Amino acid sequence: MAYQHMVSGELIDEATLTLEDLARACSVETDWVVERIESGLLADGSPYVASWRFTSRDLTRARRLYRLERDFEAAPELAALATDLIEENQRLWERLRAAGLTAD
């Protein structure tokens, strides 16, 4: 049996991505990204396409949204809710670690 190794990580927010860069990094069409932005599910919901710049946090969120929609056939709103819960859980774990309250 062959094993696949998956490497994941997050970018450091020194650079930003364009709409096209974000779509390409998520393997989606730009329309998919625009729909999520206009629905308020991704980024700041700004209607000004020319000024859209995306951070590594936006990239991580977009990838997570896409995977949830694809893998579980979730509606965009449900995928966003699940993503919100995952992100909140991560923030809480970071706070616990910072307070020295985890057994890591």
Image (tube, grey):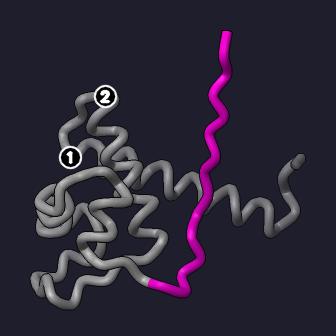
**Residue denoted by label 2:** 72
Q: Quadrant of the N terminus?
A: top right
Give the percent coordinates (x, y) of residue 78. Answer: 25, 42
Membership of 81 in magenta stretch: no
What is the CA distance from the residue labelled 1 to the residue labelled 2? Answer: 11 Å
Measuring 27% from the left and 61% from the top, which residue is drawn there?
A: 23
Looking at the image, the residue that sits furthest to the top is 1
The vertical placement of 64 against 97, above or below, is above
Please indicate whether residue 46 sits to the left or right of residue 21 in the image.
Answer: left
Principal SS element in the magenta part? Answer: loop
Give the percent coordinates (x, y) of residue 49. Answer: 13, 82
- How many C-alpha atoms fall within 10 Å of the one at disc 1: few (<14), some, or many (≥20)? some
Q: Nearer the viewer, residue 37 or 101?
A: 37
Magenta segment range? 1-15
Give the percent coordinates (x, y) of residue 86. Answer: 49, 49
**Residue denoted by label 1:** 76
Measuring 23% from the left and 29% from the top, which residue is drawn there?
A: 73
- How many C-alpha atoms fall within 10 Å of the one at disc 2: few (<14), some, or many (≥20)? few
Answer whether labels 1 and 2 touch (C-beta < 8 Å). no
Please indicate whether residue 91 sits to the left or right of residue 95 in the image.
Answer: left
SS of the residue under disc 2: helix
| Three-letter code, disc 2 | Phe
> To which quarter of the image does residue 59 belong?
bottom left
Please indicate whether residue 67 sits to the left or right of residue 78 in the image.
Answer: right
Membership of 13 in magenta stretch: yes
> To which quarter of the image does residue 31 belong?
bottom left
Give the percent coordinates (x, y) of residue 33. Answer: 20, 62
Mark number, residue 51: none
The vertical placement of 50 against 56, above or below, is below
